Structures are given as structure tokens and as C-alpha cells.
Image (tube, rainbow, N blue to C red):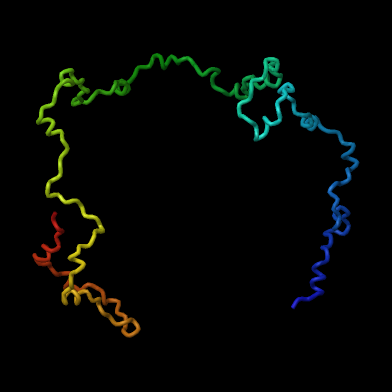
Amino acid sequence: MYSFDRIQELAEPKKAARANDLRLVWGNQETIWTISRRAMTARPSARILELAKPKQDFGKNLYRPLYLYSCGRESMIWERPSLVDFRLPSDRLLKLAEPKQCQAAYLLQRPRSSPEWPVSPAALSCKASPRIVELARPKVLHPEFLPAKKVSKFAQEAIASPRTLELAMAKRLHPDYMPVRDAAWSVTKAAKQAVATPRLVELAQPCKRLPMNLTQFNPNAFTVKESAKKAVCSARIKELACPIKR
């Protein structure tokens, strides 16, 4: 159940945070405030006057169709304007074309005035040590290195003998070679009609164990016996364990 008085109480507008604040009145949707007297008599600074200047037209009032500035223009390549429209560059372009000058603090702090500096007398009169002379020598080729020989004209025009052609042929597989059998192969007709012997049927039966709710769980039921760990397989088992040779 809900209370009607509670709904009426929640529906009332929220009271103002400050009772004496005339700027905050609930229900007043005025977005334009009255300009104060100080704002009307204030004088703009030099920076504000500079920012208030309109953007200069560097194109010298060059007329272009409006569709060239939109996304639906016919081509990305503009037509070359006539020679009448080409004039001298503006003062702004000349100023931007000037190279950037270094600051005075940097000129005072840099160690030298040019990237090229004279070699000191100590460097001119120094003598290289035996180690530097050894490192300056070019690397010697290995004694067993043989440079690539050029093929003689007789070798290029030579005709191979039948024995050379026979040795150049790729090695063939043995006639008794059998390729690796696929993981899945078709079952033969004899295997489909085979009848299992009573021994195979007996071996194919799953191991029967009592359900867990009727017998007590033994965690050591599937551990390997010590006698099985020490068992030695016979020669027959080793023979049967060998893979089939093909």
C-alpha cells in the first residue's frame, strides 16, 4: 500500500538552497542575465582586442564554388586558377617563410658556433697505440676460404653422359614400400561378416564393480601392486610389443 500524502509531499518542488539568494529562484527559466554596470563600463585589454580581430583572408578574396569545400565535391583535384589570381605573397606568408631564429640564451650557452670545429693540436700530434693499429687493420680472410670460381666455357657447353643423367635422377621408392595408412579406412567385407568367438565375447565384457552406494570407497583400489612393479616381461611379450614392420 502507498500513502497519498507521501506522494503529494514528493511532488512539491524542492526549496531553494538559500532563501536570500535572488539569482536562484525555482521555476525561473531565464537564460539571459542582466549585464552589470561594471561590465558595461569595462575597457578591453590589448590581448582581447587582438583576439577580437577577424581572421585575415590570405586568399585575396579568391572566389571558389561552395561545393569545393564540402564533402560532395566532384573531384579532389582543383582546377588551376588563372594567372590573374596569382599575386605577391602576403606579409603573413613572408613572416612564416623566415627561418626560426635561435634564442639568445642558447647562443650564449652552446659550446661552439658551428658544427665544424678545428682539430686540436693534441689530436693532430697523437700517436696511435699498437692496439689501435691492430684494430684498424682490415679483417683477414680465413685460410681455407676459396673464392667463387667462374664456370669455364667448356663446362657450360659440356654434354652430360648417360651415367651422370642416371645419377641426377631423383631417388625412387622401393617397390615394396607401403605408404602410411590413414587414421580411418574402410572396413573389409570379411571383417563385417566375422563372428566373435566365445573367448572374445568374454574379454569384451566390461569390468563389473559394485556401485558406490552399496560398497565402501577404497582409494587404494587402483594402485599398482609392488609385485607388478618388479615384474619382468618375457621374450614373447617383448616380441608382441614391437611395432609392425612394413
Query: Residue at horizontal 81%, vertical 67%?
Result: 11
Left or right side of 84 for 37: right
Q: Residue furthest bottom?
A: 214
**Left or right of 128 in this view: 49:** right
220 and 133: which is toward the camera: 220
Task: Using the image as rendered, state which of residue 126 and residue 163 is in the foreground.
Answer: 163
Give percent across and percent down for residue 72. Answer: 65, 34
Image spot of residue 47 (x, y percent):
78, 31
Q: Where 120 sits versus 67, above or below?
A: above
Residue 245 position (above or below residue 130):
below
Look at 27% across and 80% down and name the residue there.
209
- To which quarter of the image does residue 230 belong? bottom left
Hey, which quadrant is residue 145 in on the image? top left
Q: Is residue 232 left or right of residue 185?
A: left
Q: Quadrant of the N terminus?
A: bottom right
In the figure, is residue 13 to the left or right of 66?
right
In this picture, is 196 found above or below 106? below
Instruction: Give the percent coordinates (x, y) of residue 52.
Output: 79, 31
